[in-house]
Image: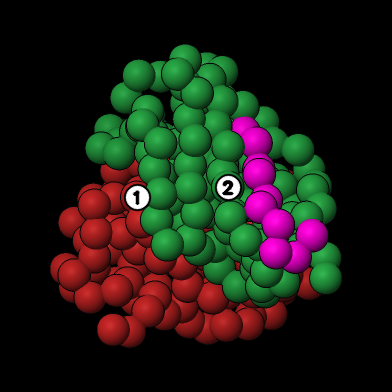
Amino acid sequence: KAGVTQTPRYLIKTRGQQVTLSCSPISGHRSVSWYQQTPGQGLQFLFEYFSETQRNKGNFPGRFSGRQFSNSRSEMNVSTLELGDSALYLCASSLTGLITEAFFGQGTRLTVV
Amino acid sequence: DAKTTQPPSMDCAEGRAANLPCNHSTISGNEYVYWYRQIHSQGPQYIIHGLKNNETNEMASLIITEDRKSSTLILPHATLRDTAVYYCIVSPVNAGNNRKLIWGLGTSLAVNP
């Protein structure tokens, strides 16, 4: 079966702009989680969506938001980009939720200049 | 949510068992122990999880102490392809609302020929 697909793979944006990242989960998975990974902070949990509802949320400012559609595809939006938002953004999907046997995508590498 | 403590790095000889420790002294009764690994430039990969009994699958074994305050992931016959960063995370399976998930920096395992 197809894995978790994240688009785009690479992105360069200017400080102050906004960006939208997309994640298509494994068919049948209703849980989609988003993570930010940087060399200094490691993997940090952003939020989880389950059946179109945000169910869990990490410690990120309101500039980071997301949504999930009825087909379970999810988008993450970051507004007013800062240089510190440069990171690898990972999406994971799970049948039961959160990190129980979750499958990760390859990630979107965002660079803010 | 419980935090975990892992050694930053470990070495293992190819063909030998790799034993990766994790301390989670503040784990709650409903929290599971999960292990993931991340090979360079890829998204994390699920390995195994458990509540209080020892678990084994085709990838690894998970040994959880009786008081559940620590656990050990065992790769019985490490290969060069097992070189990766290994993450130990604790979380309830059925996460409620506003549950923050903490991954930490993991253990960088180097399997040497």
Rendered image: mark on residue A60:
none
Residue sitting nearer the eye, B34 or A81: B34
Q: Specify few, some or many for label 2: CA neighbours under 10 Å numbering under 14, 14-19, or 20 or more.
A: some
* Residue positioned 48% across, 82% down in the render: A7
Q: Name the chain letter of the residue that bears numbered label 2.
A: B
List x then y, in percent, for residue B86: 63, 52
Q: Quadrant of residue B98?
A: top left
**Percent x, y for residue A35?**
53, 56
Q: Which residues are magenta?
A: B13-22
In the image, is residue B89 above or below residue A112? above
Please state the horizontal and vertical placement of residue A21, each as a whole percent of the image.
48, 73
Disc on res. A100: 1
Please tell me whether mark 1 or mark 2 is closer to you in this view.
2
The chain shown in red is which? A
For the residue marked with disc 1, what is the amino acid? Thr
Q: Which residue is mark 2?
A: B74
Same chain, marks 1 and 2?
no
Left or right position of B28 against A59: left
Indicate the quadrant containing the C terminus of chain A: top left, top right, bottom left or bottom right. bottom right
Q: Is residue A46 something that shows in the picture?
A: no
Q: Quadrant of residue B42?
A: bottom right
Question: What shade does chain B have?
Answer: green
Disc 2 on helix, strand or loop?
Answer: strand
Residue drawn at x 23%, y 75% as measured from the top left = A27
* Membership of A103 in magenta stretch: no
**What is the tally of numbered marks visible in this picture?**
2
Q: Pick whichever, B58 or B8, lies toward us.
A: B58
